[in-house]
Amino acid sequence: MRRVVVHEFGGPEVLRIEEAPDPKPGPGEVLVKVHAVGINPVETYIRSGTYTPRPQLPYTPGTDAAGTVEAIGEGVRDIEPGDRVYSAGTVTGAYADKALCSRFQVHRLPERVPFPKGAAVGVPYSAAYRALFQRAGAVPADVLLIHGADGVVGVAAMQFARARGMTIIATVGSEEGRELAGQQGARHVVNHFDGDHIDRILAFTDGRGVDVIIEMLASVNLGKDLPLLAPGGRVVIIGSRGPVEINPRDIMRPEAAILGMLVFSASEADQASIHAAIVAGLENGTLDPLIGREMALTDAAEAHRFLETAKPLGKIVLRPAP
């Protein structure tokens, strides 16, 4: 099989295609023939060496893929060769023709969902569900503010929230993002580069504030988020690139909460709930991953370079050759 291998940390050029023997599934493992691979931004940080903990070199990147089961190991009884699946984690890495996964890492992919969309599910939709429901405890009629709603996690959060009956306020960074957020169910959309966007968000709620904030860049926004919270409001931090200064009184007044979230910290029981909800949403059509660009597996370096220099709307997906 072919796979992408990183032998040293650095720029996109360290992503190299190599030949390797096909993995063999051991007990409790599943070998997936990969039809599509979803790229996540964190994979560019890991590749560069700026993310901790660092993987042991050499390694094959990636967690999110979709394809068909090629072989199963001893003890795997509820999945069979030929079944369509998506992965949310792998043993050997997703940037490859074939990926070895534990049984717990693969989930049924409904027939109605193409493989590229299946590869766009794992990290973004897991993060959105965990942030909204397992951390923030969001409920129907909540007013939800999503910062960076035009990113893949933001789109996933809007789809979950729309299906659950929440009022969505979205911040975006472009006119294309504004259009996308409106299409995905946001009732109000503001450009976060506009100087008055905080005042406009409060005005949308008649001064009451928002119940839940999904925060993609806490190092920039958290101090501005807290005065926006309604009584009992919650901020869930999905991403941050450094420290931030806040006023604790902004938390005390509404008896608000700041919550951290890391999707890989979810327990097995929480992950089972997450993926049951994702599969149901894919099946009934309330979840519909957005694909921004499809590229060949051999173009993995170019795909990383594009993700680092552009702000694509939708997931970048790699396609191994048939």
Image (spheres, grey):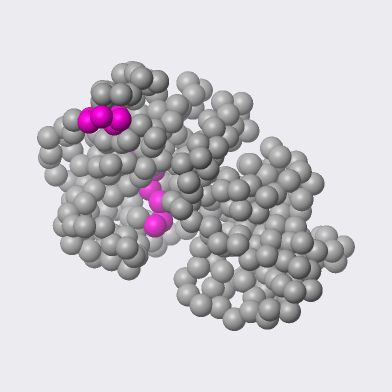
Query: Can you tell which quarter of the image residue 161 is in?
Result: top right
Question: Is 255 inside the magenta-drawn segment?
Answer: no
**Compared with residue 255, is residue 293 higher up or lower down, i.e. above or below?**
above
Of 235 and 285, nearer the camera is 235
Where does residue 8 sit, x and y in percent of width and height?
18, 62
Where does residue 215 sit, x and y in percent of width and height?
59, 62
Where does residue 144 sit, x and y in percent of width and height?
71, 54
Where does residue 185 sit, x and y in percent of width and height?
70, 44
Of 261 and 66, nearer the camera is 261
**Compared with residue 297, is residue 188 higher up or lower down, i.e. above or below?**
below
Identify the image quadrant of the N terminus. Answer: top left
Horizontal arrangement in the rendering, residue 157 relative to residue 43 (left or right): right
Total marks placed: 0
**Compared with residue 103, is residue 18 higher up or lower down, i.e. above or below?**
below
Residue drawn at (75%, 58%) of the image: 211
Q: Which residues are magenta?
A: 25-42
Horizontal arrangement in the rendering, residue 158 relative to residue 240 (left or right): right
Query: Can you tell which quarter of the image residue 200 is in?
Result: bottom right
Horizontal arrangement in the rendering, residue 321 relative to residue 89 (left or right): left
Residue drawn at (26%, 25%) of the image: 73
The answer to whether residue 137 of the structure is visible from this angle is yes
Identify the image quadrant of the C terminus. Answer: top left
Of 87 and 97, nearer the camera is 87
Question: Is 38 inside the magenta-drawn segment?
Answer: yes
Query: Can you tell which quarter of the image residue 212 is in?
Result: bottom right
The answer to whether residue 295 of the structure is visible from this angle is no
Residue drawn at (70%, 49%) of the image: 138
Horizontal arrangement in the rendering, residue 313 relative to residue 34 (left or right): right
